[in-house]
Amino acid sequence: MLNKFLLEIEEENVFSRVTEKVNKYKDEHPEAEIISLGIGDVSKPINKVVIEAMHKAVDDLADMDTFKGYGAYYGFPFLRQAILENEYQKYGLSYNEIFVGNGTKTDSTSLLELFDQNCTVLCANPDYPIYTNGAKALSRKVYYTELDENYKMKVPSEKYDIIYICSPNNPTGAAYTYEDLKKWIAYANSNNSVIIFDNVYKCFARNKNVPDSIYEIEGSKNCCIELRSFSKTASFTSSRCSYYVLPKELGLTKYWLERTLNRFNGASYVSQRGAEASYLPESQKYIKENIESYLDNAKVLRKGFEDCGFKVNGGIDSPYLWIETKKDSWSIFDEFLKEMNIVVIPGIIFGSNGDHNIRVSALGKKENSLKAIERMKKYYEKIS
Ligand code: PLP
């Protein structure tokens, strides 16, 4: 009776094990001041322009004339239009190709419902674990491709139907360039594959060779679905609002409209009004400042880990640093927790090839990064 995948999830290598270990340590050492460099959540609050719009939206719901009920399965028109005008019109996309969701975590795997059960799904190893776990929970066959020396997925010689690419990447911080993506688009078009392109960290990319959108690249509308979210830009990690593009060239729209009507009642009205307001110039100013400050934090963390002798990847076009370690990733996790009272994420959580790495996030507070680096330096000096 039970979905057998749920029995298969590896209990050893999941995020919840980090929380369990940290809580156990806290119980045993209540005096310890633990700093988390692990969490992929944002630390900046939602800006006041967006908050004001959300307050107003709450008031709308209290008035018979402005109340909103069911119906916006694909997103409220005001938000779909704002997304189009601010982000996608420039690539020749149109209103009916934009969809609103309640988070890319959900969207990234819901989209698999468009495709046959026997479709093969290709992920990276390591990767954002939701793709694999979501696909397996829907009984899809998941395969992996290795990463090259720059932490980008190697284009396979065999055919796979659905390919997940995350850029800028969680966890490795790698950002795919035009050249990298052109190869994947050529592969997808010649194999009749679909790329699900997770672009939730696009605002962190500073490299001019990294496209803002996959739709900058010729041939992408025939094979790519791009996902984005307000989570890391407008601090919507608890408010929940995301969006994605299903280009008409894919020929999937009528099926997706039908599927969505039957499976989703839309994201919250209050969130969508907030998301709309996030495009206002005053709000964009705050958002840009926040992103810059996370990137500045990433720079500080990069230098701190490098000064302690680690090889660091990422943290330049992404808020994540992917740090190579000599020990296996749970051992180094334990060492950081017990010896320095610092929480990092063991790389093995992102896939077996992620062992001997840790992921560090720059989405936290800079003062915590500085404190953590000071502790690390003291510890590594002591043991050297
Ligand atoms: N995609 C990637 C690669 C992520 O790292 C995350 C969150 O950490 C998400 C999607 C989730 O985004 P959302 O908050 O919109 O569900």
Image (cartoon, rainbow, N blue to C red):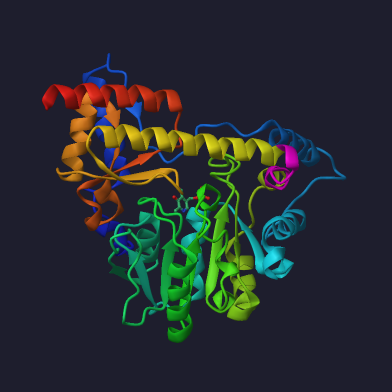
Quadrant position of the N terminus in the picture: bottom left
Q: Report if residue 194 lies within the magenta region.
A: no
Q: What secondary structure is the stretch in magenta mostly built from? A: helix
Query: Compared with residue 11, is residue 306 higher up or lower down, i.e. above or below?
Result: above
Residue depicted at x 72% and y 47%: 276
Q: Position of residue 302 (x, y in %)?
A: 35, 38
| Residues drawn in magenta | 274-282
Horizontally, residue 56 falls left or right of residue 340, namely right
Horizontally, residue 108 falls left or right of residue 374, namely right
Residue reaching furthest to the top: 31
Residue depicted at x 27% and y 13%: 31
Q: Position of residue 314 (x, y in %)?
A: 37, 48
Q: Position of residue 113 (x, y in %)?
A: 49, 71
Residue sitting nearer the eye, 132 or 303: 303
Residue reaching furthest to the left: 384
Q: Which quadrant of the figure has residue 133?
A: bottom left
Horizontally, residue 11 falls left or right of residue 273, namely left
